[in-house]
Image (cartoon, rainbow, N blue to C red):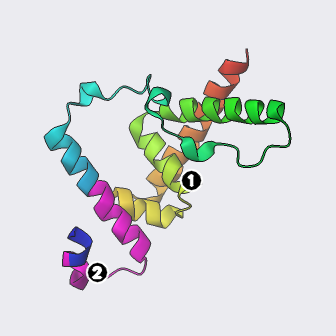
Amino acid sequence: MRAYRGISGFRGDNPRAWVMTIVRNTAFTWLKKHRDPSLISMENFEDHGEGRNLEVMDPATPELALIERADAARLESAIAGLPPLFRETLVLRELQGFNYRAIGEITGVPIGTVMSRLARARRQLTVALGADEK
């Protein structure tokens, strides 16, 4: 509804980023009003059924399917463990496919900050996944 009401004010060249900004801001507004931040626990992320989109569609063998699900769960858990700003930037880039400029528009930060957050998120993700293998 916010996007519909504000369409006449759209002056950018990337409508997808504009809508994503509205969705992001609306979600944050709702969370401030309705949720206690201490209630959101990332430790139980997998228990809430998140990440179902990472399931294997057509595995060659049951063993391969099990390995792929375990890998997807490790990756999902590592992403969930990232600080929110890094996680948001990583998800917008790697999962949603936004470019740096669009991510900057969505999050309201300069492109340099987007690149820095993305680099740090990837580094922390690599460390987290490497620690799991030891």
Q: Residue at x 25, y 48 (%)?
A: 28
SS of the residue at dot 1? helix
Whether residue 116 appears in this view of the structure is: no
Against 127, residue 30 (above or below) is below
Picture residue at 48% right of the left edge, 55% below the top: 112
Residue 129 shows up from this direction: yes
* Quarter of the figure with residue 77: top right
Local crowd size for mark 2, using a 10 Å CA cut-off: few (<14), some (14–19), many (≥20): few
Identity of the residue drawn at 32% across and 29% down:
40
Q: Nearer the viewer, residue 113 or 34?
A: 34
Q: Which residues are magenta?
A: 5-25
Query: What is the quadrant of residue 41 in the picture?
Result: top left
Name the disc covering residue 95, or none. Answer: 1
Q: Secondary structure at mark 2?
A: loop
Give the image location of residue 126, x and y in percent.
65, 32
Query: In the rendered image, which residue does mark 2 sit on?
Result: 10
Query: Could you tell whether 93 is left or right of 23 in the image?
Result: right
For this orientation, the residue located farthest to the top is 134
Alpha carbons under labels 2 and 1: distance apart: 25 Å
Query: Looking at the figure, which quarter contains the N terminus?
Result: bottom left
- Say which quadrant the C terminus sits in: top right
